[in-house]
Image (cartoon, grey):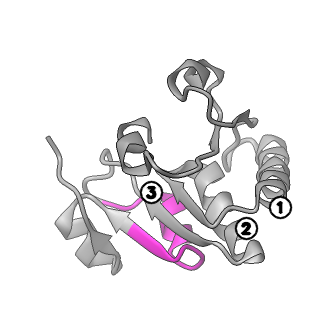
Amino acid sequence: MLRLRPAFRDCDVTYVTVNLGSRSEVGDSPFYVIPDGNRDTKLSLILMAIRVLYLVLRVRPNVVVSTGAAPGYFACRFAKLVGAKSLFIDSVANAEEMSLSAKLATSHASRVFSQWPRVAEKFGVECHGSVL
């Protein structure tokens, strides 16, 4: 996500991550750390989803952009509650299949991108970007 920062240069951006170490990379932008969670850690997943919901309701974003995983899926899903658009960008590491989060996001995000043409075609999402 930090590689996309130049695209949001003239926007008010709030960063949400599971990585406290990213704080130094976002300047004075609002920054929140949430607990990590996945399908193997159900309680952590529920706590993370509640925290994401709280932040979406508090911040009231116009647009949510996520580069993946469970927090991004929930952010896209909850964005609809406040009338926000959302973009889920699946990880470049998913060269053969979309991630579970991206698959779930296709039902909730305004748009879902894959960086791999074959994956995008296979799952009916948009292909944008390139792999260096």
57 and 92: which is toward the camera = 57
Which tag is nearer the camera, tag 2 or tag 1?
1
Q: CA distance from mark 2 to mark 1?
A: 8 Å
**Where residue 122 sits in the image (x, y, percent)?**
27, 76
Residue 129 occupies quadrant: bottom left
- What is the quadrant of the N terminus in the image? top left
- What is the quadrant of the C terminus in the image? top left
Residue located beneath label 1 in the image: 57
Residue located beneath label 2 in the image: 78
Q: Which mark is residue 99?
A: 3
Residue 30 occupies quadrant: top right
Q: Amino acid at mark 3?
A: Ser
**Where residue 62 sits in the image (x, y, percent)?**
63, 67
What's the residue at 44%, 49% (across, down)? 8
Q: Earlier in the sequence, mark 3 or mark 2?
A: 2
Residue interval drawn in magenta: 97-112
What's the residue at 54%, 29% (across, down)? 26
Which tag is nearer the camera, tag 3 or tag 2?
2
Q: CA distance from mark 1 to mark 3?
A: 26 Å
Mark 3: give few (<14), some (14-19) or many (20+) Cα within 10 Å: some
- Vertical arrangement, residue 81 with respect to residue 57, above or below: below
Mark 2 vs 1: CB contact within 8 A = yes
What's the residue at 50%, 75% (across, down)? 106
**Where residue 126 sits in the image (x, y, percent)?**
30, 74
17 and 61: which is toward the camera = 61
